[in-house]
Image (tube, rainbow, N blue to C red):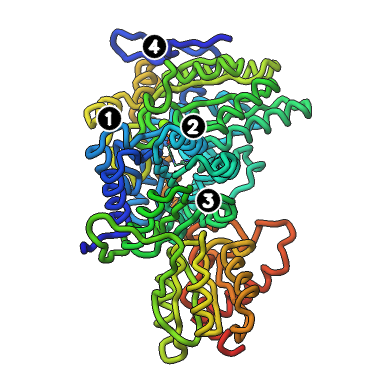
Amino acid sequence: MRVERDLRRVIGDGESLPDGEVEGLDDADLLELYRQLVLLRTYDERSLVYHRQGRIGTYAIFWNHEAMQVGAVYALSDDDWIFPSYRESAIGLLRGMPAATVLSWWRGHPAGWWNPADYNVASICVPIGTHVPHAAGLAWGKKLRGESACAVAFFGDGATSEGSFHEGANFAGVLKAPLVLFCNNNQWAISTPLELQTAAETLADKAVGYGIPAARVDGADVLAVYEATREAVARARAGEGPTFIEAVTYRAAPHATADDPSVYIDPARVEEERRRECVGRFEGYLRRRGLLPDELREQVTGEAAQLMREAIAAAEAEPDPDPELVFAHAYAAPPASFDHDLAELRRVLADG
Amino acid sequence: MGELTLVEAINDALHHELARDPNVLVMGEDVGLVGGVFRATAGLRETFGEDRCIDTPLAEAGILGTAVGLCMAGWRPVCEMQYDAFSYPCLDQLINHVGRYRWRSGGKMEFPITVRMPYGGGVRAPELHDDSPEAYYVHTPGVKVAIPSTPADAKGLLAAAIRDPDPVVIFEPKLHYRTMRGSVPDGEYVVPLGRARVAREGSDVTVVAYGAMVPLAEQAASALAGEASVEVLDLRTLKPLDEDALLASVAKTGRVVVVQEAPRTCGYAAEVAAILAEKAILDLHGPVLRVTGYDVPYPYWKLEDAYMPSVARVADAVRRLLAF
Ligand SMILES: Cc1ncc(C[n+]2csc(CCOP(=O)(O)OP(=O)(O)O)c2C)c(N)n1
Ligand SMILES: [Mg+2]
């Protein structure tokens, strides 16, 4: 099985490393990728502010992970399914999900529920790696039905240590499920560095044992991510089964709002990584091609900021959920005891 | 006696137990370098070295499974599961091996594993950081379970668990990790497993609780002052259960409300009610009432106050029982 160890790159550094090009992407595509990057970046940066203001709860920051999410999803068609972890909480925005829905999820409000089939975006997976078999199952199920849709599962470097990851990958390999296993290797699992997670030379090597080809890409290069995912999707649609993509990046922000990485990450390294973050790098690429005048940049950022202002307003306009919702939706036909429980709860709440 | 928070008391116990027995080691996700996401294991690596406070790969089945082998090599592993709901991958190891291995060796080999984990809700956390999974664990033969409600008990029960020859799972009420302070005996301190504690004496009704529900039961008792004399019995250990303490309290009050945060069906409160039906029927003046979480997934946090047993719900149950 083919494992590419070298990191794929398209975006140069504006100096010695030249820019490449992705066949089939025109200027409109490049600007759409940019718009999506800015949308996710703005979502993330505003969320951190909202958290500090007490308007959302604990939040898993995805700063410098946008290129992986945007690049991969851009290679999909709308029929393809996305299985996000908490690190990709806002990935539904790329499929037209209202930002207010995702904000509501982080606000602990049931308005954060969505029907996965509305967007072909599964619910955010909080336990590590347990959604990988779901994605394998969806992909397999589509194949059984003779449909052309495939699935992408997003998970981290730490997730490759969990049994669920291995079982899902193996199923996909055996069943030739049209699945893209997309590993966001940001080199940390909370405070645990990659070298304590695996003795393998690369995470891509893990795919070999399951008969799955693998590629490694620069996770801060939206074009390289797009290109690698497009190839994986083409393989999937051609009936050749799953592909593993290891996108190498760096978690240049805390794990989540409750985390203080200064205890375990070298701040100089973080600074260095922040200087080569993914949105700025793509801006450089567009500028070098004369595609990003300042007015356009301002317009795109302004639109994203406006979208977030409206989204937080919409999320905050949701009335507090009625206690009735505690008992809703766990069963198609709730047991009779729920009526009694709710009546009693209402009586106690009214007395209190 | 020092004044410690609940999580500081756990940390204190770990320091004393690692110092006392060179075979004790701590393992889990993020326990070493950063000292645990809740700081329960802070300072252990600095004091006892990297081999006795180990950052493991991210795999709960791997943590508990390797702990079994570590026992065979003579170690006494203390495993941290980072959160309640994230412990579930370890259940295969727990049920099929941890709880059975001693038995399969004809009692010849010991598996002195301690598993500790933060549990419970009320902390405004994202999904799946709120579960009360004790029933799954208590249901497993060969495994003991303790749940402290105070800093002193958190220290003493953990020490007892580490010294116990059998596997013990400790659930730590994360809601009170940092918000509850209490006096904790200095130095080595052991609270024996299997002994309940009368948290508050009373004569009309016994409220049976454990973990985070104990302070809630005490508040309910205060709220009922003048109306009813409420005894609060803190079970401290769910298995082995201190039946003597339970039956003694019921013999005195004749009325029992059991409080648990977990969903109701087949929860620990059902076990308490069954034991009372078997052994105290003639002492009871009314039904054993349960105040519990509901039989639904733990809700998103804007709804968690409606889900969690509250002072009002406990007081309501006590009043209904008195009026029976
Ligand atoms: C089964 C399980 N165990 C532990 C956790 C707690 N936890 C949340 S995030 C995390 C680290 C995950 O690291 P990685 O897979 O690299 O993803 P990243 O957060 O870096 O995107 C851990 C241990 C969890 N959510 N689920
Ligand atoms: Mg990671």
Q: Residue sitting at 48 percent across and 50 percent down?
A: B84
- Residue A75, image x, y percentages: 57, 23
Mark whose residue sits in front, 2 or 4: 2
Q: Amino acid at mark 4?
A: Asp
User: Which residue matches tag 3?
Assistant: B143
Q: Quadrant of residue A149?
A: top right
Residue density around tag 2, few if under 14, some if 14–19, many if 20 or more, within 10 Å: many
Distance between the Cα atoms at labels 2 and 3?
28 Å
Q: Is residue A107 left or right of residue A256?
A: right
Same chain for the residues at labels 1 and 3, yes or no? no
Q: Secondary structure at mark 3?
A: loop
Q: Is residue A294 above or below residue B257?
A: above
Determine whether label 2 and label 1 are within 8 Å by CB.
no
Q: Quadrant of residue A303?
A: top left
User: Which residue matches tag 4?
Assistant: A19
Q: Is residue A16 above or below residue B91?
A: above
Mark whose residue sits in front, 2 or 3: 3
Distance between the Cα atoms at labels 2 and 4?
32 Å
Q: Amino acid at mark 1?
A: Val
Q: Secondary structure at mark 4?
A: loop
Viewer-closest of A4 and A51: A4
Determine whether label 2 and label 4 are within 8 Å by CB.
no
User: Which residue matches tag 2?
Assistant: A159
Viewer-closest of B152 and A9: B152
Tell which circle, 1 or 4, labels the residue nearer the N-terminal end. 4
User: Which residue matches tag 1?
Assistant: A270
Determine whether label 4 and label 3 are within 8 Å by CB.
no
Tell which circle, 2 or 1, labels the residue nearer the N-terminal end. 2
Same chain for the residues at labels 1 and 4, yes or no? yes
The quadrant of the picture occupied by the N terminus of chain A is: top right
Q: Residue sitting at 39 percent across and 43 percent down?
A: B78
